[in-house]
Image (cartoon, rainbow, N blue to C red):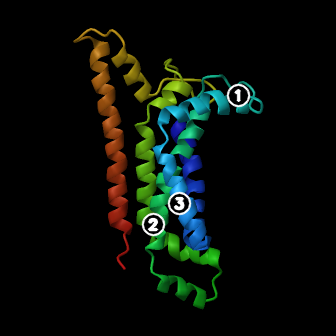
Amino acid sequence: MPDNLIMFIAVPFGLIMAIYLSEYARPAVRETVKPALEMLEAVPTVVYGFFALLVMTPFLQNFIPGLKGINLLVPGIILGIMILPYVVSVSEDAMRAVPNSLREGGYALGMAKWQVATRIVIPGAFSGITAAFILGMSRAVGETMVLAVAAGQNPNLTWDPREGAATITAYIVQMSLGDVAYGTTAYESIFAVGLLLFVITLAFNVIGFYLRRKFREAY
């Protein structure tokens, strides 16, 4: 459930911001906004977690009935915002790598700027944009502190984002900090869950590598 919220925020907003910085923003605006976005990467994740718990959750409780203090909705939103710098930065670099001659060809055919951006620039930079989303998603899948603080650590199989639940990373933290005897099922489950997390992250990277090879444009 948090993964869906992450992509719902990161994909459209990241792509829109990257298009704006690449195609619409003046150089002075680009040189100001992009470093500011990249500085967000230096913010500790625990800060995002407490911001989700103490600020965003009480705010959204005024508008969403039944939203609990510990839930999956707010951490999903915050993680989507947290990976925006990755998505925007890499996507914008890929779009700016598209030769201006392709843009000029589109303008010569009478295309508007938004048509050039959506029909020429995005397809030309598709492999880089895909890599940006895969990188951001891989970053979010391994995140621990935001979910441990704002989503809770209680196992709860639910599709309701208004409720809290323990994620894979939160489970690893909970079990590794507890008094778990060596050789027990609980002890071995830490490694099983860690292996699952590794496989998920590896799958994202393999998919990203395949898409980059398949749709890469050499200029």
SS for tag 1? helix
Quadrant where the image shows the N terminus: top right
Q: Which residue is mark 3?
A: 34
Q: Which mark is residue 8?
A: none
Q: CA distance from mark 2 to mark 3?
A: 11 Å
Q: Earlier in the sequence, mark 1 or mark 3?
A: 3
Residue type marked 3: Lys
Location of residue 81 with respect to 20 vertically, above or below: above
Q: Position of residue 203 (x, y in %)?
A: 34, 46
Q: Is residue 158 visible?
A: yes
Local crowd size for mark 1, using a 10 Å CA cut-off: few (<14), some (14–19), many (≥20): some
Residue plotted at (57% across, 29% down): 50
Q: Is residue 132 left or right of residue 6?
A: left
Q: Quadrant of residue 23?
A: bottom right
Closer-to-camera residue (177/168) = 177
The residue to which callout 2 is attached is 93
Of 91 and 64, nearer the camera is 91
Label placed on residue 58: 1
What's the CA distance linking mark 1 and mark 3? Answer: 30 Å
Q: Residue furthest bottom?
A: 108
Nearer to me, 25 or 155 = 25
**Please, what is the three-letter code of the amino acid marked with disc 2?**
Asp
